[in-house]
Amino acid sequence: MLDKFFDLFKKKEDKEIEEEVLEEVQENEEQTDLTKSEEDNSSENIIVEDKIEEEIVEDDIEDSIKKENKTEEIEEEPLLEETAEEIIKEDIDNKDEELIEDNLTEEEKEVEEKQGFFAKLKNGLLKTRDNISSKIDQVLASYRTVDEELFEDLEETLVSADIGIQPTMEIMDELRDRVKLKKIENPADVKAELASVMKEKLKSKNLDNTFNFDDKPTILLVVGVNGVGKTTTIGKIAHQQKEKGKKVTLVAADTFRAAAIEQLTEWANRANVDIIAHSEGSDPAAVIYDGISSAKSKNTDILICDTAGRLHNKKNLMNELNKIHRVIEREYPEARKEVLLVVDGTTGQNAIFQAKEFKEAAGLTGVAITKLDGTAKGGVVFPLQLELGLPVKLIGVGEQIDNLMEFNSDNFIDAIIN
């Protein structure tokens, strides 16, 4: 009985144990499922949170980048505007500086040209200046007061420089009046007054000293005795006018001297200008006729004609020049005519004699004085202008091609009287 009871109890117990085990297993499974579910949920939550955090971070980064970009844009805009303004300002400043530099350069060039011209003139007239200016200084230094003896010594100095007796007397009379009027008592102050009087005297005849070829076309007859530098003067004029853009043709009408034709041909080649020449002994008027025909066909601006330099027979010279003038008037009446006499500055009063003879024979319109660099007597300018009424157009102060200069009375006096 007891055994049955134990068996029954045992079965019951086994059953209960089995049920408990099953319950426990189920609970464990449920717990496991719950845990798994929680883990899954937790994992999902973590992933979601991570994603959210990543998105937040990304959004923050994007916002930050946008803000930075916006800030940079805001900062860059004024910078760009500032830079543009600076560039424009720099460009304007640079252009202004360049313009100023250009203007200064042009002004400086003009000053340099004037200084270079005067320095060249002064150097070329060195012997004349040493003769006149130095002697004037010696005279003035030897006196303590201004008196008549001082004026007489100055008068001798001017005459010795080939200024001529009549021009010298006119200059000294005017100087005496000015010194008295201005009450000049210091001898050292007389020199400046003398220079002023000499400048005014050279201008007193109202002569036209300009040497230009603005009126086209022009025929320039060049006359003078042999040996004064006539052919060289023609060559230098041709070169200078060609440099100024003029179309120049030379005419070798000094047909009595073969060397004259050869020399003029050399100068034509050197100056790169045309030349019309015949053989030695040809009729000068015929050569000039051909020159005029060539000039008209080629629209030449300046026709420069060399002529025979003979004075031993004045009648023949006049006849020859008259024939040339008739050809020019007949063949080229519309052309402007100039007759330039070339004299040697070293010959002094002999140059005045030549000027008188050619003035009667050729109807001179101007004079070119050569070789003034080789003489201490450059005063020949005064009698040419004051006594003969011939305007000095050109002066030669050296052998170089640019040492033939247009005459300016003020510059000339400044160069010979310091």
Image (cartoon, helix red, strand yellow):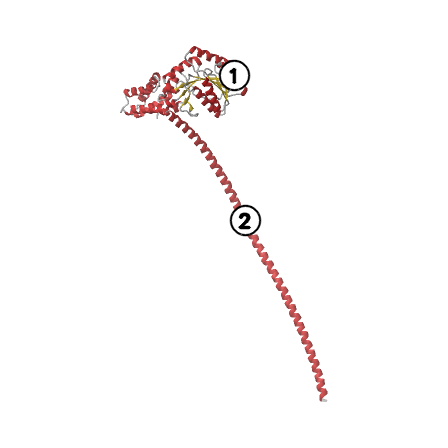
| In the image: residue 116, left or right of residue 287 | left
User: Considering the image in quadrants, where does the N terminus appear?
Assistant: bottom right
Disc assigned to residue 290 = 1
Dot 1, how many residues are within 10 Å of its Cα: few (below 14), some (14-19), or many (20+)? some
Residue identifier under label 2 = 74
- Give the residue displayed 53% in from the left and 18% down from the top: 294
Q: Where is residue 244? Give x, y as percent.
A: 48, 25
User: Considering the image in quadrants, where does the C terminus appear?
Assistant: top left
Pick whichever of labels 2 and 1 is earlier in the sequence.
2
| Residue at the limit of the structure toward the top, as seen here | 315
Q: CA distance from mark 2 to mark 1?
A: 84 Å
Q: Nearer the viewer, residue 247 or 262?
A: 262
- Give the residue displayed 56% in from the left and 52% down from the top: 67
Q: Nearer the viewer, residue 377 or 159?
A: 377
Q: Give the structural element (helix, strand or loop) at label 1.
A: helix
Write down the quadrant of residue 370 in the picture: top left
Which amino acid does the dot numbered 1 rest on? Asp
Q: Nearer the viewer, residue 367 or 48?
A: 367
Q: Nearer the viewer, mark 2 or mark 1?
A: 1
Write down the quadrant of residue 229 in the picture: top left
Q: Where is residue 97? Give x, y as percent.
A: 47, 37
Dot 2, how many residues are within 10 Å of its Cα: few (below 14), some (14-19), or many (20+)? few
Which amino acid does the dot numbered 2 rest on? Ile
